[in-house]
Image (spheres, rainbow, N blue to C red):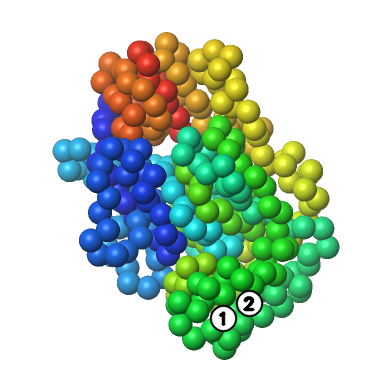
């Protein structure tokens, strides 16, 4: 089975979403003023926002209205389109052992990012502790940051102005990594990180919405609820989610960053692995162009058509289409379509 998916926009605290609208060729819907900068593709994972929860938010549907989980069961991955108009707050996600211990979850939230055209020329991400950062130093810096915003700034306008003027000591403790379309970044569980403004990506991860957050306010001044900050595990145990491994910049890039996949495309590589067992056994990702075929290791996979038009396993597709492939042994692409395939 191969079936197209409905849009599945999810509320988040940060601003964005316009690049997803343009990518999918749909008008923006900002009628309620709530940012929905992510589209969760074929999701069988409930979203968690830490404040007003909406039953079923985050669960994907086919074009005929059926829930993906009712057809394919619980998928072992979660795939998103993500568009950031501002930097996301600094956060970390649990490893599998940490998720079992603190969140009573069988899955953690290791993730990876493949950057699409539309990513801003000055885009970056923040990734990993710099050398010398200890747990004690990180805890002090987080609490100082929270207290600064709590007592030093009174309204959202002032917060927004101040956030552009004041140097954020938490960001100074992480590596700033420039990114461009065609780049790939892997984020292991426990690694502190923040996606910068102007990033447009396919995100592939374990199927959870588990995280802890190090900042009280977004750069634009939106207050992060307590439950979203500590993820439900409490203020003291939230610091157990981080892995306190300090790496220099070169080691961070060697371990987690791959560049130049767009150059491989120009050299007429029709299909190649972007994320494989050299990074993780939890998921994999391929870049596939028209005329190529990729064998699938799992019963279910998610496809994003990133450019052009053609056929995927005989189904007509165009840029912006999102599909679930279920019970197929391969993805076969014909015509001028370019895909990201996640499994």
Q: Which mark is residue 149?
A: 1
Query: Which image quadrant: the N terminus?
Result: top left
Asked if the residue at tag 2 contacts the one at tag 1, i.e. Cβ–Cβ closer than 8 Å, the answer is: yes
Q: Is residue 2 above or below residue 198?
A: above
Classify residue 114 as left or right of residue 28. Answer: right
What x and y, as percent, mark residue 71?
A: 25, 39
Q: Is residue 91 above or below residue 154?
A: above
Q: Toward the viewer: 290 or 266?
A: 266
Q: From mark 1 to mark 2, how far is it between C-alphas?
A: 7 Å
Q: Which residue appears farthest toward the right when viewing the image?
A: 132
Classify residue 308 as left or right of residue 101. Answer: left
Classify 10 Å Cα crowding around label 1: few (below 14), some (14-19), many (20 and above). Answer: some
The reply to whether residue 181 is visible in this rendering is yes
Q: Which residue appears farthest toward the bottom when viewing the image?
A: 151
Identify the element where label 1 is drawn. Answer: helix
Q: Which mark is residue 145?
A: 2
Q: What's the residue at 48%, 36% (across, down)?
A: 116
Please tell me in which quadrant of the rendered image residue 326 appears.
Answer: top left
The reply to whether residue 231 is visible in this rendering is no
What x and y, as percent, mark residue 73?
A: 32, 42
Classify residue 321 as left or right of residue 226. Answer: left
Q: What's the residue at 71%, 54% (across, down)?
A: 175
Q: What's the residue at 45%, 77% (across, down)?
A: 156
Identify the element where label 2 is drawn. Answer: helix
Q: Is residue 86 above or below residue 238?
A: above
What x and y, as percent, mark residue 226?
A: 48, 77
What x and y, as percent, mark residue 154?
A: 49, 86
Q: What's the residue at 39%, 44% (across, down)?
A: 19
Classify 10 Å Cα crowding around label 2: few (below 14), some (14-19), many (20 and above). Answer: some
């Amino acid at each position: 089975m191969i079936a197209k998916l409905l849009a599945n926009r999810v509320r988040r605290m940060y601003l964005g979403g316009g690049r997803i609208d343009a990518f999918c060729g749909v008008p923006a819907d900002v009628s309620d003023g709530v940012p929905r900068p992510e589209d969760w593709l074929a999701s069988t994972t409930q979203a968690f926002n830490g404040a007003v929860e909406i039953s079923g938010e985050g669960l994907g549907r086919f074009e005929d209205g059926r829930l993906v989980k009712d057809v394919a069961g619980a998928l072992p991955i979660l795939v998103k389109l993500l568009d950031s108009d501002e930097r996301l707050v600094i956060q970390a996600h649990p490893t599998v052992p940490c998720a079992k211990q603190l969140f009573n979850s069988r899955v953690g939230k290791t993730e990876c990012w493949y950057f699409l055209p539309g990513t801003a020329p000055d885009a970056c991400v923040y990734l990993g502790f710099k050398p010398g950062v200890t747990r004690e130093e990180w805890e002090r810096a987080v609490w100082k940051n929270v207290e600064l915003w709590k007592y030093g700034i009174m309204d959202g306008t002032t917060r927004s102005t101040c956030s552009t003027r004041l140097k954020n000591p938490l960001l100074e403790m992480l590596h700033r990594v420039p990114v461009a379309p065609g780049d790939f970044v892997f984020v292991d569980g426990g690694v502190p990180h923040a996606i910068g403004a102007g990033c447009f990506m396919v995100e592939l991860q374990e199927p959870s919405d588990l995280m802890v957050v190090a900042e009280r306010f977004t750069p634009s001044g939106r207050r992060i609820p307590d439950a979203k900050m500590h993820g439900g595990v409490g203020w003291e145990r939230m610091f157990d989610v981080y892995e306190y491994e300090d790496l220099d910049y070169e080691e961070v890039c060697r371990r987690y960053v791959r560049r130049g996949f767009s150059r491989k495309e120009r050299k007429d590589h029709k299909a190649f692995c972007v994320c494989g067992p050299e990074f993780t056994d939890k998921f994999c990702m391929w870049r596939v162009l028209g005329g190529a075929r990729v064998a699938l290791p799992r019963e279910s996979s998610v496809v994003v058509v990133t450019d052009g038009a053609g056929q995927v396993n005989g189904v007509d597709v165009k840029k912006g289409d999102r599909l679930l492939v279920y019970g197929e042994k391969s993805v076969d692409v014909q015509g001028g379509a370019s895909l990201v395939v996640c499994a």
